[in-house]
Amino acid sequence: MPDDTHRASSMVAEGRFEAALALMRQRPQPLGGEFGVGERLLLMELLERTGNLTQARAQAAVLTKHPKLTAVGRVRCLLVDGLVSKQLGHLEKSASTFLQAYRMSERLDTSEIRAWCHLRYLGVSADLH
């Protein structure tokens, strides 16, 4: 993970989403062309957290087709898509997306992402009812 990406991740842990997004956006393009999947996932999540919903959803759509995307990365994309749907007022789509993410996360060996999926699903389900 490049230093800038590591610094941006540290900023996220501190709740400094705007600063982390600014840092990610000012990085020069790598010599090989594209940023890595991990960097693109972080950028996608930062876009959602800072209200750049259209860009976040577009990043998620592109990333879900990436051949190197892991199952955890796919769940992260679904979480962002569900959050964007919720913020746009599409609660049923959001609940469906969070449930899909939760079901995928059940097959993974990471309780943290499974917990986030479950919490997001429960939250939007409560809003629906």
Image: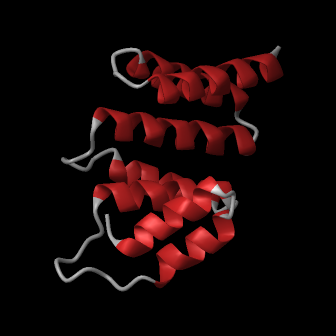
Coloration mode: secondary structure
Q: Quadrant of the N terminus?
A: bottom left
In the image: residue 59, left or right of residue 82: left
Q: Nearer the viewer, residue 36 or 11?
A: 11
Can the viewer see residue 93 in this picture? yes
| Residue pictured at 54% horizontal, 41% vertical | 81
Q: Is residue 72 above or below residue 45?
A: above
In the image: residue 31, left or right of residue 115: left
In the image: residue 88, left or right of residue 46: right
Percent across and percent down for residue 100 are 47, 21
Q: Nearer the viewer, residue 16 or 82?
A: 16
Q: Nearer the viewer, residue 85 or 71?
A: 71
The quarter holding residue 15 reads bottom right
| Residue pictured at 54% horizontal, 28% vertical | 97
The quarter holding residue 17 reads bottom right
Q: Quadrant of the C terminus?
A: top right
Percent across and percent down for residue 68 are 20, 48
In the image: residue 100, left or right of residue 89: left
Percent across and percent down for residue 57 are 52, 52
Q: Is residue 94 above or below residue 84?
A: above
The number of discs equals: 0
Q: Is residue 55 above or below residue 63?
A: below
| Residue pictured at 48% horizontal, 84% vertical | 26
Q: Is residue 88 above or below residue 117?
A: below
Can the viewer see residue 54 in this picture? no
| Residue pictured at 70% horizontal, 35% vertical | 90
The quarter holding residue 121 reads top right
